[in-house]
Amino acid sequence: MSVIKDVIQKVKQMDPDQREFHQAVEEVMGTLEPTTKKHPEFVKANIYERIVEPERTIMFRVPWVDDKGNVKVNRGFRVQFNNAIGPFKGGLRLHPSVNLGIIKFLGFEQIFKNALTTLPMGGAKGGSDFDPKGKSDGEVMRFCQSFMRELFRYIGDDTDVPAGDIGVGGREIGYLYGYYKKIRNEHTGVLTGKGMSYGGSLIRPEATGYGTSYFAAEMLATRGLDFRGKIVAISGSGNVAQYAVEKVNQLGGKVISLCDSSATVIDEKGIDAKKCEYVLDLKNVRRGRITEYADKYKTVCYEGKNVWDVIREQGIKVDIALPCATQNELDGKNAAALLKNGCICVAEGANMPSTPEAIKIFQDKKILYGPGKAANAGGVATSGLEMSQNSLRLSWTREEVDNRLLLIMKSIHKNCADTAEAYGKKGDYVTGANIAGFTKVANAMLAYGVV
């Protein structure tokens, strides 16, 4: 049996219930076989087995009090996976589905995503099974303060720098950072995604959605294409999806879909700039449901279905797909339907949104497919830029940050494309992203010896 297969089998044996983590490990490790021959030093140092084991896994109790005076308890996590190239870095997710396996998959993916940005950041992830949906500001604040009462022991601007993810936006980051600052009595860049009034960076809220669009544009350019006149399907309606809509509009595309956990809306006229502003207010200020968009703009609404189910069932034409919601949202049936309906490009704005069956369909048909660790790296890249600004006690202009983001996404695309070609897999962005990210981290681990 090969080194790679041994590692995958061991992961499954040690953590049999962590399906998402198994999936992430198989997806990455399945492309690394060529590196075992080109880099025998990695095999000798057992880098492959070491890299799938987190450096530190932290679990803790999060007690808090709701508005009625009832004591509630949630479970908190922080998985510090690998800091070979820089401080641990990765978001915090608040969602009922959160468990150790999901946090480990996210942290593992983060290692390679962060390596691709060219910035010195290691991989980590954290969160809780707390659901902020339907909670008052006071309840969210009390939860965040309780969460930080434990997390603060393990983070720092040169140790581990958390950020936002699903369920953690500007409100939550504010509560978390405010409490950290209070109990540590210091004002440092220990969290990213902060508000502009207390150390945040311009373009950070937009960065993941913008970056996904920039990466898709780079892929399209390899075939002499661009967004102009293309019909674009986007899933989700949170931070990533909102700004993917905004950037696609700027690049000349027409977005026809958004969704949340309750429903999908299809707007054949296009979700233009004015409608996008409405979505930002609906989701970020009023915290409403996407069905309200359908009511306001008299569009078709499919309750209880995600975007990709609707596109498959209704036979809707799509040129470009940007899955920006959550893991495993796009399965094999829906991938086949996308291709049947004219899709030529998929760029992932979420983490691992396509199932292995879907990825195989995209690759077999040789359409442009950008995996999340490359296509959605713009968010953490701009978090890295926020860390730089905090360290320098400077604030860069919107244009400067956006330009840096664009250059980083171009660099990530080129690195993925060049690496894939160097390993005989031209056009395979999955292989290119995995090997490029892995070799950078592996070389650093090798340099440190056995630690």
Image (cartoon, grey):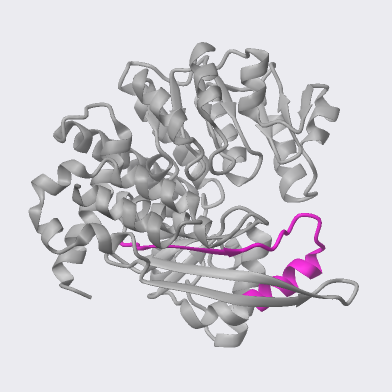
Please provide percent x and percent y for residue 80: 42, 68
Residue under the image location 64 percent in, 79 percent down? 179
Q: Residue at x 75, y 37 (%)?
A: 278
Q: Which is more toward the observer, 330 or 395? A: 330
Measuring from the top left, give residue 222's x and y in whole percent: 30, 22
Front residue of 50 and 158 = 50
Magenta residue span: 120-147
Which quadrant would residue 215 be assigned to in this image? Answer: top left
Q: Is residue 393 visible?
A: no
Q: Which of these two is toward me, 359 or 367?
A: 359
Disc tally is 0
**In the picture, which quadrant includes the C terminus?**
bottom left
Q: As displayed, is residue 184 above or below residue 275?
A: below
**In the drawing, does residue 75 fall left or right of residue 401?**
right
Asked which quadrant contains residue 137, the reply is bottom right
Residue drawn 39% across the image and 33% down it: 370
Q: Is residue 314 left or right of residue 192?
A: right
Is residue 12 inside the magenta stretch?
no
Q: Residue at x 56, y 58 (%)?
A: 164
Q: Residue 39: x, y in percent? A: 10, 51
Observer able to see residue 312: yes
Q: Is residue 445 left or right of residue 320?
A: left
Is 285 situated left or right of 329 in this image? right
Give how far across and how far down residue 375 sits, in percent: 41, 39
Determine if the magenta segment contains residue 133.
Answer: yes
